[in-house]
């Protein structure tokens, strides 16, 4: 599936009884990265989850466009979107190799894609360890592996660099640049600057 544009129009989100923000408009085109900024609790994570379809907006629309026009949102999310959040969603009792292969295949990766991701994020040395024995940075690399393994155009990233060391920040930065060069899109909630060229949107909730 080829998604060429993500549109967020007039979006309003709440957490419990508290309004996070309203009338939010945002567009993301092929080859573009946008950094979401704002104080803790402003709604950056909630926005990413709403785009991924996990939160129902109070108002507004999240829409996806392909080369031929609009793409049905459920199909776009199922086949064209990656979300990596604060919680890596890894099963602690599995070997890292098993967990990586399960998640990558679930997202549609083939053997070549998995090999590419393992090399790019230096995962081979982790594969013999149980997920529970990995450090926070190692777990994040394992979770990010599915982005490189199963190529989907829209990457939604929530503080992706937080637990990574300098070497692996650089490695993932290279993957981000390659993704954009191939027409991908990146929307990342961050506090620190991204290591790639990116526009910025402030969530002022």
Image (tube, grey):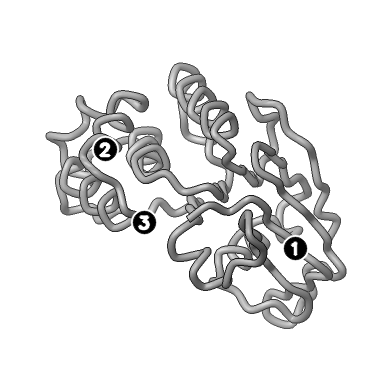
At horizontal 65% and vertical 43% (from top left) the residue drawn is 30
For the C terminus, give its image quadrant: bottom right
Compared with residue 5, is residue 167 higher up or lower down, i.e. above or below? Answer: above
180 vs 91, nearest the viewer: 180
Left or right, 65 with respect to 124, comes to right
Name the spot of residue 96 as percent of width and height, x first: 20, 42
Q: Residues within 10 Å of mark 1 (few under 14, many from 20)?
A: some
Q: Distance between the residues labelled 2 and 3?
A: 18 Å
Compared with residue 194, is residue 55 higher up or lower down, i.e. above or below? Answer: below
Name the spot of residue 91 as percent of width and height, x first: 25, 56
- Please report whichever mark, 2 or 1, sits nearer to the chain's N-terminal start: 1
Callout 2 touching callout 1 (CB < 8 Å): no
At horizontal 51% and vertical 64% (from top left) the residue drawn is 77
158 vs 69, nearest the viewer: 69
Q: Which residue lies furthest to the top in this view?
A: 167
Left or right, 73 with respect to 200, comes to left
- The quarter holding residue 33 reads top right
Residue identifier under label 3? 89
Say what secondary structure mark 3 lies in: loop
At horizontal 85% and vertical 55% (from top left) the residue drawn is 204
Left or right, 141 with respect to 29, comes to left
Compared with residue 96, is residue 17 higher up or lower down, i.e. above or below? Answer: below
Q: Distance between the residues labelled 1 and 3?
A: 26 Å
Residue identifier under label 2? 114
Name the spot of residue 134 as percent of width and height, x first: 27, 37
Q: How far apart are marks 2 and 1 (CA)?
A: 32 Å
Compared with residue 124, is residue 141 higher up or lower down, i.e. above or below? Answer: below
Residue identifier under label 1? 8
Say what secondary structure mark 1 lies in: strand
At horizontal 75% and vertical 63% (from top left) the residue drawn is 8
């Amino acid at each position: 599936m080829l998604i060429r544009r993500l549109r967020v129009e007039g979006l309003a989100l709440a957490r419990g009884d508290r309004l996070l923000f309203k009338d939010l408009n945002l567009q993301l085109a092929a080859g573009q990265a946008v950094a979401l900024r704002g104080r803790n609790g402003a709604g950056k994570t909630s926005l990413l989850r709403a785009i991924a379809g996990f939160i129902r907006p109070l108002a507004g629309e999240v829409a996806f466009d392909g080369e031929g026009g609009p793409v049905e949102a459920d199909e776009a999310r199922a086949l064209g979107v990656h979300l990596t959040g604060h919680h890596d969603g890894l099963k602690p009792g599995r070997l890292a190799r098993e967990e990586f292969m399960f998640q990558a295949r679930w997202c549609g990766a083939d053997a070549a894609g998995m090999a590419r991701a393992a090399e790019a994020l230096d995962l081979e040395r982790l594969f013999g360890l149980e997920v529970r024995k990995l450090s926070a940075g190692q777990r994040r690399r394992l979770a990010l592996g599915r982005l490189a393994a199963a190529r989907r155009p829209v990457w939604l990233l929530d503080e992706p660099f937080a637990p990574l060391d300098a070497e692996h920040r650089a490695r993932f930065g290279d993957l981000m640049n390659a993704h954009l060069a191939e027409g991908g899109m990146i929307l990342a909630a961050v506090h620190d600057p991204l290591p790639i060229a990116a526009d910025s949107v402030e969530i002022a909730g």
